[in-house]
Amino acid sequence: MAETSITTLWPWKVRELAEKESDDGVFKMLRSDVTRFLTTILIGTTVVNIGATALVTDAATAIFGEAGVTAATGVMTVAILLLTEITPKSIAVHNATEVARFVVRPVAWLSVVLYPVGRVVTYLSMGMLKMLGLKGRSEPYVTEDELKLMLRGAELSGAIEEEEQDMIENVLEIKDTHVREVMTPLVDVVAIDVSGNLVDFHEFWVTHQYSRVPVFEQRVDNIVGIAYAMDLLDYVQKGELLESTTVGDMAHKPAYFVPDSMSVWNLLREFRIRKVHMAVVLNEYGGTVGIVTLEDVVEEIVGEIFDENDSKEEIEKKTGYIVMRAEGIYDVDANTSIDQLSEDLNVKMPEGHQYETVSGFVCEAFGYIPRTGETIKVVLEKEPQEDEDEDEHAEGKSDRQETKGKASTIQT
């Protein structure tokens, strides 16, 4: 019971309980050296079980003779399973905090008595771990997978909402997300010429209403700075000559450049340090491939953000869309991410791909840029469902086996 209650408690739970206690609290004692407590419990349990078995066997032999050995073995097996294993551990699993609070202090006292034996056992155990190439830890830790598992459990129990779980998991994942996965590609970038005057900028802003606009020189992929709509308003309020002032005069130069391989987590940190909200994204050859904003980073955590000025076309371009026209027939926007396609249609995409959107997937499938109306067949395997029960899982497996090998038709 004592061992189960201690091992059942998550390390973060022990830390939380310890912080609420006084200096001599039981969970502070437990947190200080978990290995000592577990060693003491295992030694005590082993000694008691062996000693009790020996005494019962001796008594049974004295009464029943040689048959007493068999009787004692059967009785002690049932007794140990029921009284020291199944029943106590079931109680400890469901009441880990209360049981641990009750047993930790007595175990601490017992560890003083068994200290010499415990030290020898611990030394031998550490030696075996070293021989196996493993390292012992006196303080356990929570892995990212364990944290996600706890989040799913909290969501299923109703402690947190599904949206909250998704946001926390998104925070954990952005360190592994690259800038190229969240940026606006160059083909969709709206920019203004550095040689244009502020009247041009004002007309541009009335049409697009972006607070920050990339400024290019000669070519749109040669971005030299960022123009702020707020600066334009300052010029208007001060009565400056809008026709004689160029966009280049008011642009913030140079623009902040980042590699497309940079993690979104590092980008967020750089945004905070540099106090900027927009960066120009370069590929490994130094060519401009897009722009990324603070809003793009935030959307990786909370989901897509729209305002009252976003048109239907802009929303579809930003999020992509998947519309079922008939059974097994879908209209899919080329900008739809591969992850979204895989999730919404429950299909497994080919591994090791180098594309991020449906457009890239289609081009790789064709081997060239297809013309409108061209079709091609590809094989996509269905993904297993995580939340289905055994019957549904069996049915889903059967469906996947039937689907595997069947081709899906893509029409451009």
Image (spheres, rainbow, N blue to C red):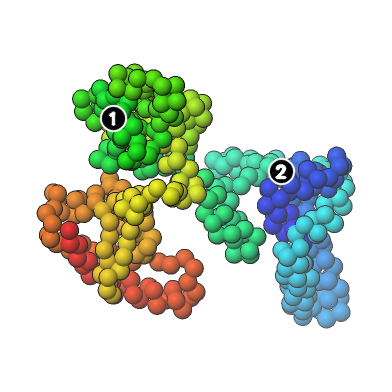
In the rendering, at what x and y percent does residue 398 appear?
35, 76
- At horizontal 65% and vertical 45% (from top left) the residue drawn is 140
Q: Residues within 10 Å of mark 2 (few under 14, many from 20)?
A: some
- To which quarter of the image does residue 93 belong? bottom right
In the rendering, at what x and y percent does residue 326 appear?
27, 74
- Residue extending furthest front? 239
Regarding mark 2 in the picture, which secondary structure is present there? helix
- At horizontal 25% and vertical 22% (from top left) the residue drawn is 195
In the rendered view, tell whether residue 238 sits above or below residue 266.
above
Left or right position of 117 against 404: right
- At horizontal 13% and vertical 53% (from top left) the residue drawn is 370
Rendered-image quadrant of the N terminus: bottom right
- At horizontal 71% and vertical 50% (from top left) the residue drawn is 13
Considering depth in this image, is 18 or 187 the residue closer to the camera? Answer: 187
Give the number of the disc on residue 122: 2
Q: Given the image, on which type of amino acid does mark 2 rest? A: Thr
Regarding mark 1 in the picture, which secondary structure is present there? helix
Q: Given the image, on which type of amino acid does mark 1 rest? A: Asp
Give the number of the disc on residue 237: none
Left or right position of 317 against 409: right
Q: Residues within 10 Å of mark 1 (few under 14, many from 20)?
A: some
Left or right position of 25 against 406: right
- To which quarter of the image does residue 374 belong? bottom left
Q: Which residue does the numbered mark 1 point to in the structure image?
A: 200
In the rendering, at what x and y percent does residue 268 appear?
48, 34
Q: CA distance from mark 2 to mark 1?
A: 77 Å
Whether residue 144 appears in this view of the structure is yes
State which tag comes first along the sequence, 2 or 1.
2
Considering depth in this image, is 116 or 72 the residue closer to the camera? Answer: 116
Considering depth in this image, is 229 or 296 the residue closer to the camera? Answer: 229
Q: How many marks?
A: 2
Name the front one of labels 2 and 1.
Answer: 1
